[in-house]
Amino acid sequence: MKLSPEMFEGHGVNRSAAERRAASLGARRSVKKQWQAAWLINAIRCIDLTTLAGDDTAERVRRLCAKARRPLAAHIMDGLGISGMTLTTGAVCVYPTMVPHAVKALRGTDIPVASVATGFPAGLMPLKLRLEEIRYAVGEGAAEIDIVITREHVLKGNWSALYDEVAAMREASGESHLKAILATGDLQTLRNVYSASMVAMQAGADFIKTSTGKEGVNATIPVSLVMVRALRDYLDATGHRVGFKPAGGMRSAKDALNWQFLMKEELGRDWLEPTLFRLGASSMLGDIERQLEHNVTGRYAASSRHALA
């Protein structure tokens, strides 16, 4: 849609109220036993299993993809009674040069390959080069593109520049889904987070995403609450659903539960599907597997018992 500043300009965000709401979420919601297991299994379906390290190799990516194809050990699947279920992660996320290795390793599955692009994580490259990186990743087989925005546009309130940038990235992505990383830890205010979310959606983002995982502050529940409220407002105004992806700093099964509780309470059951919700994580899967083994055996296993992602 066209840029419509009236949808976000003057929209205040009460930080203390957002923080109170976020703090109450985990405290008031608790699931145990088989219900907790069900929530954690759903979290696995929504994980973008990620490796974005400077020493990534083809072999590491292949190992990650093997974990994405079979995230739980066979004895855990049997113990949970889901051995007949096709359980995979939502996607595998890598750097553009690693995309061909991931595509090859995931051949024969429905697991999409996501690629970061546009000068990740800072995004401080000429726009022409950032767009070319998107086209390269798409050409190598990436079905999803995680782009980073220019934070300066947000900090200066230059919404038309931000809109044009994301719209150009949307066009360069073609048929691939576009996830707009807002790097919320760099945006200073929750009002900026709300406004940047709205602009990214207006420019055509299929998902809005909290963080690169490289900022000093990454995904938090208060920031996620503001972004989710923006999703809800955008849906009310346009009838169009946009997905949400928190990323960075999420490591535990409890984190997986809390973000799902947020989605369920604020947006409803539909936003607990991989088409509208992703968790950007890697080590989180290991803790989920450990918790599910406890559900089956009554004991916590050493982390060495589980295959590394």
Image (cartoon, rainbow, N blue to C red):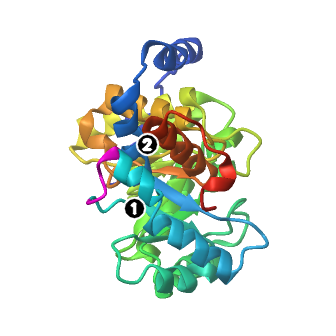
For the point 47% across and 41% down, the residue is: 292
According to the picture, the residue beneath numbered tag 1 turns out to be 88
Tell me which segment is drawn in magenta: 80-84
Q: Position of residue 186 (x, y in %)?
A: 70, 42
* Secondary structure mostly taken by the magenta-highlighted segment of the chain: loop
Question: Which of the two residues, 188 or 5, is positioned nearer the viewer here?
Answer: 188
How many dots with numbers? 2
Q: Residues within 10 Å of mark 2 (few under 14, many from 20)?
A: many
Q: Position of residue 298 (x, y in %)?
A: 50, 33
Instruction: Answer above or below: position of 175 versus 272.
Output: below
SS type, badge 2: helix
Instruction: Answer above or below: position of 175 versus 285.
Output: below
**Labelled disc at residue 50:** none
Residue 88: quarter of image: bottom left
Residue 83 colored in magenta in the image:
yes
For the point 44% across and 68% down, the residue is: 69
For the point 42% across and 45% down, the residue is: 43
Q: Residue furthest left?
A: 239
Q: Is residue 79 left or right of residue 301?
A: left
According to the picture, the residue beneath numbered tag 2 turns out to be 198
Residue 47 colored in magenta in the image:
no
Q: Amino acid at mark 2?
A: Met
Can the viewer see residue 227?
no
Q: Position of residue 185 (x, y in %)?
A: 68, 39
Q: Residues within 10 Å of mark 1 (few under 14, many from 20)?
A: many
Can the viewer see residue 16?
yes
SS type, badge 1: loop
Question: Which of the two residues, 266 or 14, is positioned nearer the viewer here?
Answer: 266
Question: Which of the two residues, 155 or 252, is positioned nearer the viewer here?
Answer: 252
For the N terminus, which image quadrant?
bottom left
Which callout, 1 or 2, points at the residue further toward the start of the chain? Answer: 1
